[in-house]
Amino acid sequence: MQKKTFYSEVDTGQSLPLMEAFYTLQGEGYHKGGAAYFIRIGGCDVGCHWCDVKESWNAELHPPTPINTIVDGAKKYSNTVVVTGGEPLMWPMDPLTTALHKKDIQVHIETSGAYPLTGDWNWFCLSPKKNKLPLAEAYERADELKIIVYNKDDFKFAEEQAEKVKPTCKLFLQPEWSRRDKMMPLMVDYVLQHPKWKVSLQTHKYLNIP
């Protein structure tokens, strides 16, 4: 009964399984260094073994929160919101993005792109995963492509993914945090040889901020 009740509350997007929300500096990718309010939505079945927020995977651990409550929290802090997870596109995002835009808030998303696209986004960061690839519409929408580099094979994967996004999409390679010391020299050499790519670092971890 509890599971049925949970999904009845979130299946329209009027409530979402909010894991956490916090105001901080963006640590990765194109917008790194800028202030933003992060909304982390629970639920993910992509299953990356190196995920650093595995506690987000089980959506039922994170009680459905009305989007009005989420938006009220966001507007106190910033005119930029980043919706992340987990995998936020598991849930209908249109109600949340509509409500945020009514408050003149810019809305960004970080997603694997493995679920149908919902919501109206000012910036769409696509981070594909090998075990559950993005849908075609995610490639078409992506403003930013971020590939996590865990081993040498990920450079080939990065090029395969880059072929599917639009020419204006910004391309980033980011070392998996636990492998950063080993992969960074390889990434530096790769970007020097393939300058269409840029290196993204998890600067928030270096700065010891959320």
Image (tube, rainbow, N blue to C red):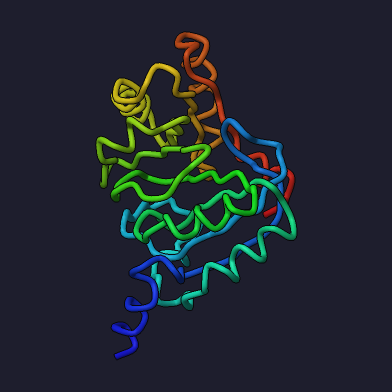
Residue drawn where x is 41% and y is 65% of the image: 13
Looking at this rendering, what residue extends furthest in the front direction? 102
Is 82 located above or below residue 86 in the figure? above
Q: Quadrant of the C terminus?
A: bottom right
* In this rendering, position of residue 164 left or right of residue 207: left
Q: Position of residue 72 (x, y in %)?
A: 66, 66
Res 90 → quadrant? bottom left
Q: Position of residue 206 (x, y in %)?
A: 70, 43
Res 77 → quadrant? bottom right
Residue drawn where x is 49% and y is 46% of the image: 109
Q: In this rendered view, identify the residue nearer to me: 102 or 22.
A: 102
Question: How many marks do you count on the picture?
Answer: 0
Is 63 located above or below residue 25 in the figure? below
Res 44 → quadrant? bottom left
Q: Where is residue 5 in the image (x, y as percent from the top left)?
A: 34, 84
Residue drawn where x is 52% and y is 38% of the image: 122
Q: Quadrant of the N terminus?
A: bottom left
* In this rendering, position of residue 161 left or right of residue 25: left
Is 168 located above or below residue 176 in the figure? above
Q: In this rendered view, identify the residue nearer to me: 75 or 133.
A: 75
* In this rendering, position of residue 161 left or right of residue 190: left
Looking at this rendering, what residue extends furthest in the top direction? 193
* In this rendering, position of residue 141 left or right of residue 29: left
Residue drawn where x is 31% and y is 59% of the image: 45
Is 153 located above or below residue 132 in the figure? above
Q: In this rendered view, identify the residue nearer to me: 121 or 176.
A: 121
Q: Position of residue 168 (x, y in %)?
A: 45, 19
Q: In this rendered view, identify the residue nearer to me: 209 or 34.
A: 34
